[in-house]
Image (spheres, rainbow, N blue to C red):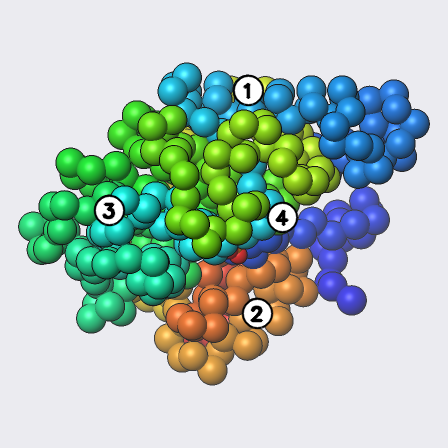
Amino acid sequence: MMKMSKAQRAQGMTTTHNFSAGPATLPKAVLEQAQAEMLSWNDTGCSVMELSHRGEKFRALLSETEDLLRQLMDIPANYQVLFIPGSARLQFSGLPMNLLVENPRANYLVSGYWSKLAYREATKYGQITQVASSADDHFMSVPEPETWQLDEQAEYFYYTPNETLQGVSCPFVPDVSMPLIADMTSCILSKQIDVREFGVIFAAAQKNLGQAGVTVVIIRDDLIQAPMPQTPAMMDFRRYRDSKSLCCTPPTYALYIMNLTLRYWAGQGGVLQIEALNQQKSQLLYQFIDQSDFYYNRVAPRYRSASNVTFNLPKADLEAVFLSKAQEQGLLGLKGHSAVGGLRASIYNAMPLSGVEHLIGFMQIFQKAYS
Ligand SMILES: *Cc1c(COP(=O)(O)O)cnc(C)c1O
């Protein structure tokens, strides 16, 4: 049982805030709408998950979802938006299989856990250059361009703007003379970007776009070509383009949740509003950590992530106590990834400012009790 304040008991509930890195918290309004529509969606008498993906109503939902994403990100007409079933990691293979056909060479910037895995996977499919790596710095920074060793003949340049485990983000968009591929799983829609600077942007849905099960691939038209011959048919980007992402049964409920999530953000004023809120949340938390002589963050300010705030306690053996006390207060999902350790507050788009304030309030009390 979680402890409740008097006010919470009076309301009959505990305010919980979920800081999980992914799957992650969703806007409450989205969950409430999904709940209200569970038994009959859009006057069909059925749940959306029971309807044919080829029916008119589902097709309309899918095409509206694409339109919403296009509006929110200002995606130009010469980019395709593909909804591909499965994880972001599936695209660690899907991208090289589709792009490294005639010229199997690519550049990878290794700045953390996810870009390292993407790099390793890509080496199965071509001659891959690790442009630079911040492994020696325990991935607490991003290698700056003057240290890069680029393959100038490569087909693309791959990087991960936000490294979710380390809480490190790339403070610049790489300025390279080849198509740029960005894994935006943990930062899509978190701030304004210019899609024209990228060849491919991809993101699994479970951090900022909705629930797990689907990955969005935004790809410039001319980069879609016949993939390597051994590519599974359901990994061939042309099929998703030509069928409007209906070449197989898509994860319909995940797309429905994405639709509700995008509608919600469009109604809140779009990416500019989200970005302002994200800045406010992350500044508040980093300022609190920096002024404290108890908590600390290892990432230099230039590279700090606005989405994933990693922090440590003066003694690692206090972590378990911190996590259990936090949970009693309704603060969930604060454990760092096992590959990195420490603590981590993921404060994606759907985390309200009140969640960060709740967390800081708890951290102050914990610090008093244990310093
Ligand atoms: C979470 C995450 C992934 C992994 O997503 P899956 O859908 O589990 O494959 C990949 N890249 C980044 C940047 C992530 O944050």
Q: Residue 97: image x %, image y %? A: 40, 50
Image coordinates of residue 218 in percent, x first then y, are 43, 33
Q: Nearer the viewer, residue 162 or 343?
A: 162
Mark 2 within 8 Å of ligand 1, using the beta carbon: no
The residue positioned 55% from the left and 46% from the top of the image is: 233
> Residues under labels 4 and 1: Cα distance?
20 Å
The quarter holding residue 333 reads: bottom right
Q: Secondary structure at mark 3?
A: loop
How dense is the environment of label 4, judged by Cα within 10 Å: few (below 14), some, or many (20 and up)? some
Q: Which mark is residue 103?
A: 3
Q: Which residue lies at the image location 92% right of the left edge and 27% below the top edge?
A: 45
Q: Residue furthest left?
A: 146
Residue corresponding to mark 2 = 323
Task: Give left or right: position of 237 versus 56.
Answer: left
Can you identify the residue that label 4 sits on? 213
Label 1 sits on residue: 67
Q: Which sits earlier in the primary sequence, circle 2 or circle 1?
A: 1
Q: Residue at x 11, y 46 (%)?
A: 152
